[in-house]
């Protein structure tokens, strides 16, 4: 399988209460750490956290807003979610902050059959044009909105 050029980057961010003992990503991996992590079900944050920390450490919520509400209520130690919604949740909820370190970063590309090099070239050319003229940024802004 071939992949197109990268057309977007996703960042998973960590939201914690302002007085949290979690000050950086390494704290989540510290020996003996047993934090309860909230995620939006079915997202890459959910998949990565479950792989890294085990299902017992991860609480899945239907929406990011539900996960943040559980954090505010003291039922979680942190929430890991896409960066743009994370910023909005922190802005909308007093007493929360974003850690300076990201949990993960992922690049988005289009998968194309290995033997279909002609299609790969055409997709890459189209993506370059759409990136340059701002169309990709507009699509991301429209379809990956900041949740509140």
Image: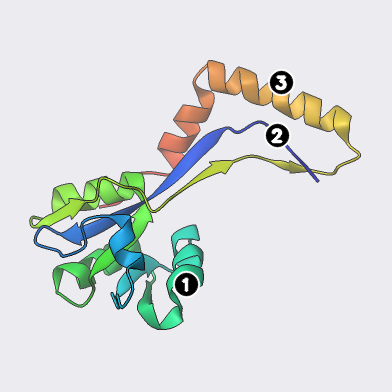
Mark 3 vs mark 2: in front? 2
Instruction: Look at 22% across and 53% down and name the residue there.
Output: 89
The location of residue 59, given as percent across then percent down, is 36, 76
The location of residue 37, given as percent across then percent down, is 32, 71
Mark 3 vs mark 1: in front? 1
Instruction: Look at 71% across and 26% down and name the residue there.
Output: 124
Asked if 72 appears above or below 2 in the picture, the reply is: below
The residue carrying mark 3 is 125
- SS of the residue under disc 2: loop
Q: Marks 2/1: CA distance? A: 28 Å
- SS of the residue under disc 1: helix
Mark 3 Cα within 10 Å, few/some/many (few <14, many 20+)? few
The residue carrying mark 1 is 50
The residue carrying mark 2 is 4
Query: Is residue 57 found left or right of 52 in the rendered image?
Result: left
Mark 3 or mark 2, earlier in chain:
2
Nearer to us in this view, 103 or 140: 103
């Amino acid at each position: 399988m071939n992949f197109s050029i990268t057309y977007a980057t996703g960042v998973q961010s960590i939201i914690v209460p302002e007085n949290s003992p979690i000050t950086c990503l390494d704290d989540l991996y510290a020996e003996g750490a047993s934090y309860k992590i909230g995620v939006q079900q079915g997202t890459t944050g959910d998949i990565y956290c479950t792989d890294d920390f085990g299902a017992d450490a991860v609480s899945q919520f239907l929406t990011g807003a539900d996960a943040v509400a559980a954090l505010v209520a003291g039922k979680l130690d942190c929430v890991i979610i896409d960066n743009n919604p994370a910023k909005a949740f922190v802005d909308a909820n007093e007493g929360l902050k974003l850690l300076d370190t990201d949990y993960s970063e992922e690049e988005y590309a289009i998968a194309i059959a290995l033997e279909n090099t002609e299609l790969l070239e055409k997709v890459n050319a189209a993506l370059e044009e759409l990136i340059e003229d701002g169309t990709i940024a507009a699509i991301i802004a429209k379809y990956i909105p900041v949740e509140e």
